[in-house]
Amino acid sequence: MSPKSAKNLDTVKHAEQTPEAEQPWAELGLKREEYDRVRDILGRRPTGAELAMYSVMWSEHCSYKSSKVHLKQFGEKAPTEGPGAEAMLVGIGEQAGVVDVGQGYAVTFKVESHNHPSYVEPYQGAATGIGGIVRDIIAMGARPVAVMDPLRFGAADHPDTKRVLPGVVAGIGGYGNCLGLPNIGGEVVFDACYQGNPLVNALCVGVMKHEDIHLAKAAGTGNKVVLYGARTGGDGIGGASILASETFADTSAADAAGKKPSKRPAVQVGDPFQEKLLIECTLEAFHADLVVGIQDLGAAGLSCATSELASNGSGGMRVELDDVPLRDSSLSPEEILMSESQERMCAVVEPGKVGRFLEICEKWEVTATVIGEVTEGERLEIFWHDEKIVDVDPRTVAHEGPVYQRPYARPSWQDALQADDPARLARPADGKELRAAALALVSSPNQAAKSWITDQYDRYVLGDTVLAQPEDSGMIRIDAESGLGVAVSTDGNGRYAKLDPYEGARLALAESYRNVAATGARPLAVTDCLNFGSPEDPDAMWQFAEACRGLADACRELGTPVTGGNVSLYNQTGEAAIHPTPVVGVLGVIDDVARRTPMAFKDEGHLVYLLGETRNELGGSAWSQVAHGHLGGTPPKVDLERERLLAEILIAASRDGMVDAAHDISDGGVIQALAESCLKGGKGARVIVPDSMDPFVFLFSESQGRALVAIPRSEEVRFTDMCAARGMPAARVGVVDGEDLEIQGQFTLPLAELREAHEATLPDLFG
Amino acid sequence: MTTRIGVVTFPGSLDDRDAQRAIRIAGAEPVPLWHRDRDLHQVDAVVLPGGFSYGDYLRCGAIARFSPVMEPLVEQAKAGMPVLGICNGFQVLCESHLLPGALTRNDHLHFLCRDQRLAVENADTAWTSDYTAGQEITVPLKNGEGGYVADERTLDALEAEGRVVFRYLGGNPNGSRRDIAGITNEAGNVVGLMPHPEHAVETLTGPTTDGLGFFTSVLKNLVTA
């Protein structure tokens, strides 16, 4: 029998009459006590449709039930003064945070994960990851202006990486390029720990005027609820559950509910062309002042959009599911509510403006339908064939899900891991061995050039890209007249975080902050994507708790508030969790993008200075991984005051035109930074190891709070005076010159040889 | 009187604002044209911009070619109005038979974004007169379906008539026959190419300003016409 035939329909009335009917709550991912709580809230058993809504909205992915208690710190510890705090216009809790960048402009940015779908179906998983984050940005009223993708894959030479990586890269390019958004940066990291759990995070930046900021809420009795965009199909049903499920064997929830629809993919399929139309249509409707509230349809589809819009507003909502345009007429009401078909949005529009709203949709050839209205009272009521199938308090669905205090404890192996100091590892003994180590480092998959990947992304479209990968951060011009711009970087080092998750999270922020400052922009605000193992594993939960504590502390110390982000848990196959991987995105502002500092050594004769202090710090380093396959000891020390000082120096040097190039020093150390700056500019450098420093430590240590800068001789005195006055260690280590990277007294690397080593790795692996 | 150059926006056009910016920087007035427009609003020339019109579904440019705006455009192009098709715009021009041949999937099957060296082989078209024949320029290239193909006779004719306007230098990026990056019609008023001159008009956002010559060329030709 068809599940949609009215006589079989599980209506509210039917649920009241059959209190003892068996329900597949466990198959839908609910725990016994969660199901009991739904019954308590409703005072009866839920209907099938209600059960579907609660199960997806109370899933880990939608409800943050395991992470909430730790995420609170980002609000509680948020800096209350300084430029970051003053710039916050919209904070955590909305679809994306909004930051004031001056001249009447506001910027919204957010990073999200699409990890599990990208492992199942790399192309569509990665593509729809872009689609989802872009809709979050347009829902705030902003025009998306750039995307970035922090990626983590399994071992570069593992056969499955050859399946996952090309698909993910093609998906990001296929969707983002067709959408017309420049891809300006991100990361690509390989490590065997991500083999069964690759991380595909996506960040989007949007720009708007202050007066255009919109929040998702359904206010005003009688206002219409308009669903627009793609038609609703059977794709992605139960996606929200699979996103946060322990194993992918938990198949389609609708299947488990005994409804037996045809098997459909739980990963959604993207249509970037539809999304492009959605951007233009939404922004035009915003600018015509036709919208009260707006929400994108992502995880949990209509269940999420209607319950969140209603619970953020003042009244209730009545929805007629029969009016939802369908791609597949056989869908049951539960499936319509749970479908995660992409490229859909929901707007709340005053009745008098509905006509104009629909006209704009028609102009862009976007399907738009009134599916309901805002009602008095506080109930969300959903009807199917004139029968009421949902009658809930939307707040209990959207905001009052379960909250767990998951047990956590410092793993038993943590001490042994930290005790395994890299000091025991054999180090290069002479210039010849240093040379070999340098070549091995710059050609290793993690340190090699990523252009094989990033050349598949359009970095030019929209015409405002001032800096893009491999620069320290991407930079976008916002105002052509004044030159106002923003810079964004994303960073995270899972190896550091494995050694010490508290410090690892602080290091991720420090690096991202430094990367933004290196280009001359002032860091203002943070978005984070927290990728961890199972919250039900006390080891992984401890890593998560420590990382949250570390990031919240560091954000307060640096004065950069967290504006929003995303948590991805269950990145674990059996006992093997990924390295704890907090990815931190930092947004900075620059008054005039013409003042930007690029990373390339371009001009012969410019002096190379090393800013900061170099210590013997090789725990978690790229060298220890490349040379010895080692991970142990403690990560480099974080000194946030030093990071702040370094940023001040780099920003002042950019503003006053003292430096020609700057490059952050992070994984791979000084040798990696030198190689990248030389190759980018096509110029060599003669470098002298500072007196009293061990050449190996000088070249390979990953001490924090450092950068390389190239300075015209005419600016040397002014620059060194500034560093001395502010207490910033600055050592002249060389000069831009010739066709070789020469470490005097140690070794010489012709640029051609260096380039071949650095650039051939990824094409050889994946080309 | 300022010269007015139209830029057509199809659903899925992406580089339309960039083309408008380039026109403005060159000193002309950009006029947005909508794909449903049935006339060209008295513009002096038209740019068909890059992007993915209609999502590139069916075949790149195959649906856009039936847009209402294409009817007056084809008519006026045949009457001598300068028309430039960039990337997706080039694909639309081929689909509309204003230019011969077709664009196919890159031979390496990947989307490719890079700064591309080009040789200007014909500096007598409406869009290239500010260059000199043999000049080398560098502008961004970014496409997934940029492989230019035509039958041998057409290719020979294009070569013989000097209608190959641009050729790739430093390696063929997509498998285009005879390294062809851009071509013109017999009259020299319609030019199509895969690379993006409109993304090389400012030092801040482009690799060079080599692309500006397209727009200054047409401006001069229209003013002196």
Image (cartoon, rainbow, N blue to C red):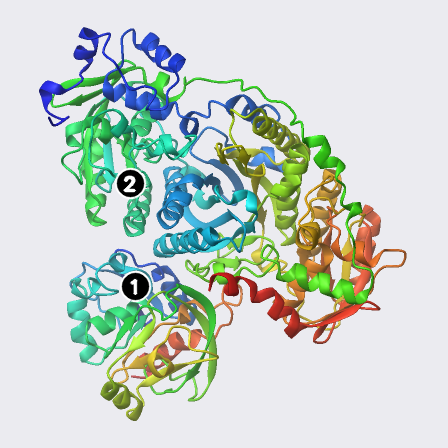
Which quadrant would the N terminus of chain A be assigned to in this image?
top left
Task: Please state if A726 lies on the left or on the right of A190 as rendered.
Answer: right
Q: Tell me if I can see residue B186 in this picture.
A: no
What residue is shown at x 37% (from left), y 46% (from top)? Answer: A121
Look at mark 2 in the image and give the residue it sits on.
Answer: A265
Which chain contains the residue that carries disc 2?
Answer: A
Secondary structure beneath disc 2? loop
Give x and y (percent) for residue A647.
Answer: 69, 47
Q: Tell me if I can see residue A416 in this picture.
A: yes
What residue is shown at x 18% (from left), y 64% (from top)? Answer: B69
Give x and y (percent) for residue A704.
Answer: 73, 46
Q: Quadrant of residue A676?
A: bottom right
Q: Nearer the viewer, residue A239 or A409?
A: A409
Asked if A392 appears above or below A597 in the picture, the reply is: above
Secondary structure beneath disc 1? strand
Q: Nearer the viewer, residue A155 or A476?
A: A155
Give x and y (percent) for residue A345.
Answer: 29, 37
Disc 1 from disc 2: Cα separation: 45 Å
Give x and y (percent) for residue A528.
Answer: 54, 37
Q: Is there CB contact under 8 Å for labels 1 and 2? A: no
Specify the amino acid type for callout 1. Answer: Val
Q: Nearer the viewer, residue B30 or B212?
A: B212
Specify the amino acid type for callout 2. Answer: Pro
Look at mark 1 in the image and give the residue it sits on.
Answer: B31
Task: Please state if A653 lies on the left or on the right of A448 as rendered.
Answer: right
Which chain contains the residue that carries disc 1?
Answer: B
Mark 1 crowd level (few <14, some 14–19, many ≥20, 10 Å Cα): many
Q: In the image as oriented, which residue stretches furthest toward the bottom?
A: B160
